[in-house]
Image: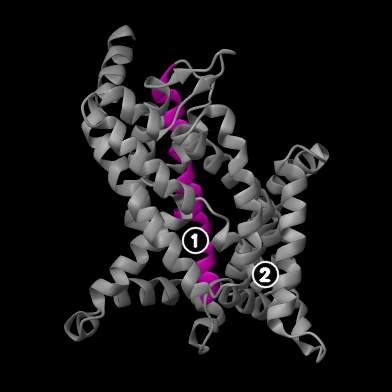
Amino acid sequence: MWITAIIGMIIKFYSSSLSVILREKQKNGDPLGGPMYYMSLGIKRWGKPLAIWFSIAGLFGVLPAFTANQLSQTFMDVLKPNNYVIIGDLQWKFIIGILLSIASGFVIFGGLKSIVKVTSNLVPVMVALYFFMGLFMIFANFEEVIPTFRLIIFEAFNLKTAVTGGFWGLVILGVRRAVFSNESGVGNAPMYHGQSQSKNGTDEGLVAMLGPLLDTILVCTITGLVVIISGAYKVENLNGIVLTLEAFRRLFFGLGDILLLFMVFVFGISTLFTYSYYGVKCFGYLTKISWGKYYNYFYVVSIVFSALATVDIVVGIIDLSFALMCIPNMIAIIYLSAYVNMEMQKRKWLK
């Protein structure tokens, strides 16, 4: 994950720079950028087919499958509603999915705009709280930090694992999870950075590089250390957010899972809003810009089904969709990298 994050910083720099260098303008003057636009504008012959390929895969890759699933699973694990005999797990997940879809629908369709402001104000607070809790648990168990890093390094290069055939599986798993955390090469971030008012693409690219650094190297390292120090990874049948909840509960006075529940909810609900925007851009490119908003109806309904699905099915769908988005996007980034290099050389010469 660390190695993938370092490579991901380079990829995000180039992709987000291209989203500003090669973009269109709407009739009202607003910028319109993203992978589909730098593909079609920069690659004359086969850029359009790549852009269509990317946009179709994006319609499924940006669905709220993982976020809604993990939110519902978090509520189920912490609040333990399955203790009630009358309503089973599936019914509770359905209820949680309905509530999430309603809350998301109000914001996505333009209502209750104050929720967006509140969420925007809460996210930095939640990030600060997560760092405080994570660092507190690490320093409270400081004597375990060096053995934990030693375990990570030695297990990463475990020859026994390599001989038995599981080594490359772990490498691929680490790469997939790193890409999922910072989305480097997938193409989601350039759709957002392409709307920037920056005049120079490389300025936006430098900002985008912070994503993998903060998401994967910093946050995921803190999370990984907490999970290993707590010993929660040794418990069978714990996966995803449930594993992290158990680790936080063990190391933070038995209340860590409750606090993490609140943080996950804020992060998750804000992610639901953001991903709908990506889907609107993909659908708008495939049809008409003005038609992009109709994707939101499909998006909101999918939240309910995502809450009901198992985590393995959800992760499989996201992994496949991200791979199908990544292929045309990486081809375009490599092919068009000269545009970014030229801008860097030009700015260096101007200085």
Q: Residue furthest left?
A: 163
Q: CA distance from mark 2 to mark 1?
A: 21 Å
Q: Is residue 249 left or right of residue 282?
A: right
Residue 161 in picture, x, y percent from top left: 24, 82
Amino acid at the residue labelled 2 = Ser
Residue 101 appears at what percent x and percent y?
71, 56
Q: Nearer the viewer, residue 202 or 316?
A: 316
Residue holding disc 2: 72
Quadrant assignment, res 330? top left
Q: Which amino acid, mark 1?
A: Cys
Ranked by sequence position, the earlier of labels 2 and 1 is 2
Name the foreground residue: 102 vs 74. Answer: 102
Is 211 magenta? The answer is yes
* Foreground tag (2 vs 1): 2
- 22 w.r.t. 250: above or below: above
Q: Residue at x 40, y 56 (%)?
A: 321
Reading the image, the residue beneath label 1 is 220
Which residues fall within the magenta stretch?
Answer: 200-227
